[in-house]
Amino acid sequence: SKAQLFDKEKGTNVTFEDVAGLEGAKEEVQEIVDFLKKPQKYTDLGAKIPRGALLVGPPGTGKTLLARAVAGEAKVPFYSLSGSDFVEMFVGVGASRVRDLFKQAKDKAPSIIFIDEIDAIGRARGKGMAQGSNDERENTLNQLLTEMDGFGTNTGVIVLAATNRADVLDRALVRPGRFDRQIHVDLPEVHERKEIFKVHLKPLKTDDSIDIDFLAKQTPGFSGADIANICNEAALIAARHDKKKVSKQDFLDAVDRVVGGLEKKNKLISDHE
Ligand code: ATP
């Protein structure tokens, strides 16, 4: 589905409509869309356009989706990389990847760069990892800092980065002129889960037994990604029973299955701690 959503040259075709709930976060990123679309409105007044913002929140809450929607709404290209890609990289590769990415984004400006899991490269230096493996990560982080400083005040490139641990980030990253804004992307409340269910129910063939209010109430603590997963599981379960439509019971079974999966995952995590 990544391929469908993402075309480097044309940008993404994701819009704010695809992002359910997250009203506060959407309002904040709306300003970034405006920076990309009408930079002069700001620069004419002598304002410096922010270079970066951090999207902070638990896994699966729609940070990547929101970043894509910013690019989609502004109709600008979207360049992305994930911090976890850099974990096992050869010396020099991480830094040169960062350099290439910024070069491409500047060439095609206005544009968005999105760095998922920035904590994997942006952890405070000299902490966390074993000696040795740290060097390449530090090179990558330093390159990222250099690139962000190298921007003029208006290169038309805005860097969004996602993390679920803003507290572990290197101070240098969150200094003014770098990622100096934080946008919180939290787990959805019941009314937001309802909106997320609506988005993910849309492509499904469902029968009249479906009750979105009930589903939203049954899923406290679930992320948008969990809800997307439930909707697809429900359709798979219905298909397995050769049904023509997905029913309420299929959703309940899907919730059980996803809850079971989450419990297993949590158990694995706590066993390792
Ligand atoms: P991670 O921190 O694990 O990278 P994330 O916060 O970036 O997660 P996404 O990758 O954006 O989360 O979400 C995964 C998928 O979950 C989305 O592609 C979408 O299908 C669904 N989803 C998550 N949040 C929302 C939302 N608010 N509205 C609609 N769909 C959502």
Image (tube, grey):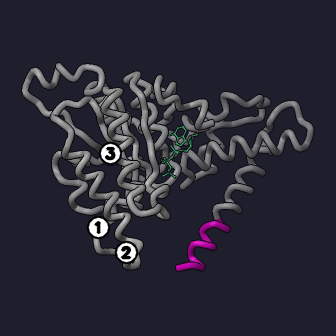
What residue is drawn where x is 37% and y is 50%? 96
Q: Residues within 10 Å of mark 2 (few under 14, many from 20)?
A: few
> How far across and how far down the image is residue 269, in percent?
57, 72
Q: Which residues are magenta?
A: 263-273
Q: Secondary structure at mark 1?
A: loop
Q: Residues within 10 Å of mark 1 (few under 14, many from 20)?
A: some
Q: CA distance from mark 1 to mark 3?
A: 20 Å
> How far across and how far down the image is residue 270, in percent?
56, 76
Q: Which amino acid, by three-letter code, is at mark 1?
A: Ala
- Confirm if mark 2 falls within 8 A of ligand 1: no
Q: CA distance from mark 2 to mark 1?
A: 8 Å
| Mark with earlier residue (3, 2) | 2
Relative vertical location of residue 254 with respect to residue 172 in this rendering, above or below: above
What residue is drawn where x is 32% and y is 61%? 139
> How far across and how far down the image is residue 268, in percent?
62, 73
Q: Residues within 10 Å of mark 3 (few under 14, many from 20)?
A: some
Q: Secondary structure at mark 3?
A: strand
Q: Which residue is mark 2?
A: 128
- Please say if the residues under marks 2 and 1 sit with CB atoms less than 8 Å apart: yes
Is residue 19 or residue 248 the one in the foreground?
19
Checking the image for residue 183, the label placed there is 3
Relative vertical location of residue 101 with respect to residue 58 in this rendering, above or below: above
Relative vertical location of residue 209 with respect to residue 88 in this rendering, above or below: above
Q: Secondary structure at mark 2?
A: loop
Q: Along the horizontal axis of the image, is 164 left or right of 223? A: left
Please state which of the two labelled residues, at mark 3 or mark 2, is closer to the viewer: 2
| Mark with earlier residue (1, 3) | 1
Q: CA distance from mark 3 to mark 2?
A: 25 Å
Is residue 39 or residue 186 the one in the foreground?
39
Q: Along the horizontal axis of the image, is 85 left or right of 36? A: right
Q: Which residue is mark 1?
A: 124
What residue is drawn where x is 17% and y is 45%? 177
